[in-house]
C-alpha cells in the first residue's frame, strides 16, 4: 500500500484528462444512461492514474479514447481502477483482458492510496463474482488478495 498526494500540477493534469474523456463520452454517446456523476468519475479516475504513475515512477500520457487498447499507463499497459471509498474492492469485468495487470487505487483528490494489483485472469474467480447495484455482474477482488506494487518493478 502506498499513500500518494497529488500536487496542484498533477491534479490539473488528471482533471484535464478527465474533462476530455467525459466530453468524448458525451460526443460519442458511450454511456447513454447519463447519471450526472460522469464528470467526477472521469476526473477521479484520471487522477488515480496519475497517482499510480507518481508512485511507480512511470510515464502517464493522459490518453483519451484508447479504452483497453494500450492501458492507462501507456509505458507499461497497466489498467488503473479508482474507487472513492478506501474499503472498496477492485472491479474486474468479463471483457477485461486476462493477461493485463489491474491496479486498485482508492480515495479522492488529492489523496489516494495505491492498494495493489492482480492480473485479470487470476481475478476471474466465481467466489468474487457479484452483481452489486443492479449493474452487470463483475468480479470484486478483495484488497487482501492483491499483490504488492513492489512486485511489478
Image: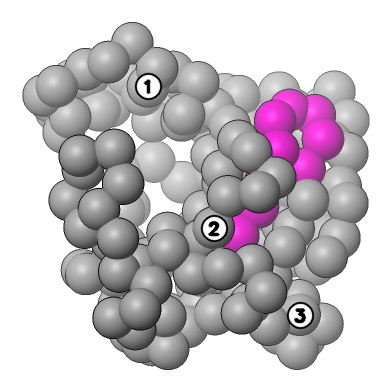
**Residue 63 visible somewhere in the drawing:** yes
Q: CA distance from mark 2 to mark 3?
A: 15 Å
The segment highlighted magenta reads: 104-112
Q: Position of residue 39 (x, y in %)?
A: 44, 18
Q: Split into 4 quadrants, where in the image is the C terminus?
A: bottom right
Which residue in the structure is indicated by mark 1? 38
Q: Is residue 6 left or right of residue 88?
A: right
Which residue in the structure is indicated by mark 2? 89
N-terminal label among 2 and 1: 1
**Quarter of the image holding residue 84?**
top right
Which residue in the structure is indicated by mark 3? 148
Residue at 78% x, 51% y is 113
Q: Split into 4 quadrants, where in the image is the N terminus?
A: bottom right
Q: CA distance from mark 2 to mark 1?
A: 20 Å
Callout 2: helix, strand or loop? loop
Q: CA distance from mark 1 to mark 3?
A: 30 Å
Foreground of the two, 112 or 70: 112
Question: Crowdedness of circle 1 by 10 Å Cα count: few (<14), some, many (20+)?
Answer: some
Q: Is residue 6 left or right of residue 43?
A: right
Question: Crowdedness of circle 2 by 10 Å Cα count: few (<14), some, many (20+)?
Answer: many
Amino acid at each position: 500500500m502506498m499513500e500518494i498526494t497529488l500536487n496542484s500540477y498533477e491534479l490539473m493534469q488528471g482533471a484535464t484528462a478527465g474533462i476530455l474523456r467525459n466530453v468524448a463520452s458525451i460526443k460519442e454517446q458511450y454511456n447513454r444512461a447519463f447519471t450526472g456523476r460522469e464528470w467526477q468519475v472521469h476526473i477521479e479516475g484520471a487522477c488515480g492514474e496519475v497517482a499510480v504513475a507518481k508512485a511507480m515512477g512511470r510515464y502517464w500520457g493522459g490518453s483519451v479514447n484508447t479504452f483497453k487498447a494500450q492501458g492507462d499507463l501507456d509505458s507499461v499497459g497497466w489498467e488503473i481502477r479508482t474507487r472513492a471509498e478506501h474499503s472498496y474492492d477492485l472491479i474486474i469485468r468479463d471483457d477485461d483482458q486476462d493477461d493485463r495487470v489491474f491496479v486498485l487505487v482508492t480515495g479522492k483528490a488529492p489523496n489516494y492510496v495505491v492498494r495493489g494489483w492482480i492480473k485479470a485472469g487470476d481475478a476471474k474467480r466465481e467466489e468474487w463474482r457479484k452483481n452489486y447495484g443492479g449493474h452487470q455482474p463483475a468480479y470484486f477482488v478483495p484488497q487482501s488478495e492483491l499483490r504488492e506494487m513492489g512486485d511489478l518493478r
